[in-house]
Image (cartoon, helix red, strand yellow):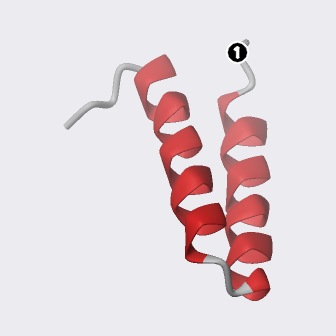
């Protein structure tokens, strides 16, 4: 909702936590969620 930098950092921390958990599904899910940040700023390339 307009806080792109904050959202991006949230997902970066979430990816690190998911990676640390050792569960690939968590990491993939977090990466997929981070894509929405890119879509929000129309950065689809």
- The part of the image, by quadrant, that contains residue 20 is bottom right
Rendered residue at 78%/64% (across/down): 13
Position above or below: 39 against 11:
above
Q: Which residue is mark 1?
A: 2
Q: Position of residue 31 (x, y in %)?
A: 52, 54
From the viewer's perspective, tell me whether residue 11 is left or right of residue 24.
right
Quarter of the image that includes the C terminus: top left
Rendered residue at 70%/52% (across/down): 11
From the viewer's perspective, tell me whether residue 36 is left or right of residue 8.
left
Q: Nearer the viewer, residue 24 or 17?
A: 24
Residue closest to the far left: 45
Rendered residue at 55%/32% (across/down): 37
Q: Position of residue 4 (x, y in %)?
A: 66, 30
Element marked by disc 1: loop
From the viewer's perspective, tell me whether residue 25 is left or right of residue 44.
right
Rendered residue at 72%/72% (across/down): 18
How many marks can you see?
A: 1
Position above or below: 3 against 45:
above
Residue closest to the far top: 1
From the viewer's perspective, tell me whether residue 37 is left or right of residue 45.
right
Quarter of the image that includes the N terminus: top right
């Amino acid at each position: 909702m307009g806080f792109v930098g904050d959202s991006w950092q949230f997902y970066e921390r979430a990816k690190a936590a998911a990676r640390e958990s050792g569960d690939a599904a968590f990491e993939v899910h977090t990466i997929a969620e981070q894509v929405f940040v890119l879509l929000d700023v129309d950065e689809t390339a």
